[in-house]
Amino acid sequence: MKNQSAARQRSPFAKAMLAFVGIALFLGFMALGTWQVQRRAWKLDLIERVEQRVHSAPVALPEPGQWPQINAASHEYLPVKAQGRWLDKQSVLAKALTEAGAGFWLMTPLQLADGTQVLVNRGFTPEKLRGQWLKQIAEADPSAETVTVIGLMRMSEPGGGFLRKNDPANNQWYSRDVAAIAQAQGLSRAAPYFIDQGVPASNPAHTQAQAGADSEVLRPGMTVIRFPNSHLVYALTWYGLAIMVLGAAWLVRRHDKAAARS
């Protein structure tokens, strides 16, 4: 009987390994739960910030002297209005995946009266039209027409997309990296942000912002301003798993005590 109970008892090494794994799992699940709580707070702040901004009337672009103070917390999704002329020949196509499918964002610099430029995301174009756009960009003539652009201010997306780096040398863009695009296209005084042309339907400037839009060729106003918020569910899931680890540790401890008494 004693031999059987001894066989049921774990060795010190096995106990140490179980304790190590249990502690690691508990701390890992707690860390993930806490991270989701922090993500929830960030998401709620983002939703509130966007809701407060996107419905307001467009304002003038910040002056170049204000550029160092521009950041996501104070400026992103702010409706803005700009006037200038298109630098069509310096446009690029940035990879996009939207509710309308895979395709590209047409990013065109707008030359402003003060000599600065601002990149404008003029809208989404389907993947099948890439060749047509590249040809049109290559053959574009300088424009003297002054246009008005109304849209939402967005922050630069440096580097590239998921597992894909931007390749300026081959004109391959997987993100809207303002600094890299400006350098590749010879824009010496480009603003550090870009504009998503178009504003939500609830904005008083919506009709003017959408004027002349052709959804079959170029679709502006596709900025995502509704953000899913499931972080509380994720946090409770991770914390629940941490509690389960504690329960499992209690059961293992109970089993070991019973084995020792047998």
Image (cartoon, grey):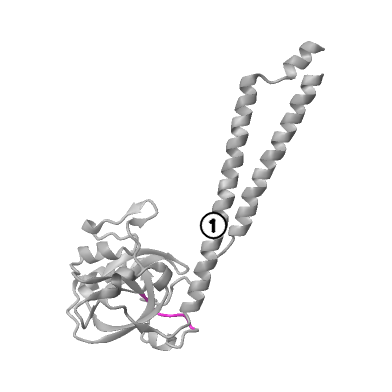
**What residue lies at 78% left-to-right and 16% top-to-bottom?**
5
Dot 1: element: helix
Identify which residue, 68 or 210, lies in the foreground: 68
- Mark count: 1
Q: Quadrant of residue 144?
A: bottom left
- x, y percentage for residue 120? 31, 74
Within the magenta stretch, is there residue 198? yes
Q: Quadrant of residue 135?
A: bottom left
Position of 216 relative to 34 (above/below): below
Position of 14 relative to 137 (above/below): above
- The residue carrying mark 1 is 38
- x, y percentage for residue 204? 45, 88
In the rendered view, does 86 fall on the left or right side of 240? left
- x, y percentage for residue 113? 21, 83
**What residue lies at 43% left-to-right and 80% top-to-bottom?**
199
| Residues drawn in magenta | 196-201
**What residue lies at 70% left-to-right and 36% top-to-bottom?**
248
Position of 149 relative to 47 (above/below): below
Identify which residue, 7 or 19, lies in the foreground: 19
What amino acid is at disc 1? Gln
Position of 154 relative to 238 (above/below): below
Identify which residue, 58 or 136, lies in the foreground: 58
